[in-house]
């Protein structure tokens, strides 16, 4: 199943996480579902890819060196071009302060990595890309 958009007939998913092993695992799972994700290993690299590739959906980790996922979200939400870009937060840290900080940053979901299996995440993100996922923005 190919997931398409109007830019190049393929939806663009960007995954930003400083855990290279996790990125490779998710990349393999998404490829099995017809999605070829772009990968970024830092907030800075993710920002550059967002600006150059204009992804349709972003999955972002919070705790990364130099530029955290929250820092990146704040930059995106100030930019008219990216203020409505769908972003799902995927983190190891279920801290109330992180949830609170992301509340006003229009994320589509906040998921703790240990609370979801890889296949479930792929299904959820694929649903968002197809437009049949949970469309509510918090």
Image (cartoon, grey):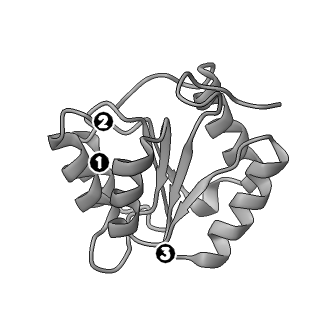
The span from disc 2 to disc 1 (Cα, nearest Å) is 7 Å
Q: Residue at x 58, y 61 (%)?
A: 113
Q: Position of residue 47 (x, y in %)?
A: 33, 58
Using residue 36 as the reference point, say whether residue 13 is left or right of it.
left
What SS does tag 2 mark? loop
Most distant residue in the front direction: 8
Q: Position of residue 111 (x, y in %)?
A: 52, 50
Position of the N terminus by quadrant: top right
Which residue corresponds to mark 3? 18
Which residue corresponds to mark 1? 102
Q: Residue at x 38, y 74 (%)?
A: 64
What SS does tag 1 mark? helix
Q: Position of residue 11 (x, y in %)?
A: 60, 34
**Nearest to viewer (mark 3 / mark 1):** 3
Q: Residue at x 39, y 67 (%)?
A: 45
> Closer to the camera, 96 or 9?
9
Check the image and report above or below for 19 versus 119.
Answer: below
Q: Residues within 10 Å of mark 1 (few under 14, many from 20)?
A: many
Which numbered tag is attached to residue 106? 2
What SS does tag 3 mark? loop
> Closer to the camera, 105 or 101?
105
Q: Quadrant of residue 138?
A: top left
Tally the marks.
Answer: 3
Using residue 120 as the reference point, say whether residue 11 is left or right of it.
left
Mark earlier in primary sequence (3, 1): 3
Mark earlier in primary sequence (3, 2): 3
The span from disc 3 to disc 2 (Cα, nearest Å) is 22 Å
The span from disc 3 to disc 1 (Cα, nearest Å) is 19 Å
Q: Residue at x 25, y 34 (%)?
A: 81
Which numbered tag is attached to residue 125? none
């Amino acid at each position: 199943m190919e997931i398409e958009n109007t830019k190049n007939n393929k939806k663009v998913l960007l995954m930003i996480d400083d855990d290279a092993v996790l990125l490779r695992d998710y990349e393999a799972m998404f490829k099995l579902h017809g999605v070829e994700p772009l990968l970024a290993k830092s907030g800075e690299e993710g920002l550059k890819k967002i600006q150059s590739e204009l992804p349709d959906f972003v999955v972002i980790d919070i705790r990364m060196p130099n530029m955290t996922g929250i820092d990146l979200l704040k930059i995106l939400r100030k930019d008219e071009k990216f203020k409505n870009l769908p972003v799902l937060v995927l983190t190891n840290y279920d801290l109330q302060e992180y949830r609170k900080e992301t509340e006003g940053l229009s994320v589509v979901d906040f998921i703790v990595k240990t609370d979801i299996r890889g296949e479930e995440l792929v299904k959820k993100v694929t649903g968002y890309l197809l437009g049949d996922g949970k469309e509510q923005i918090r």
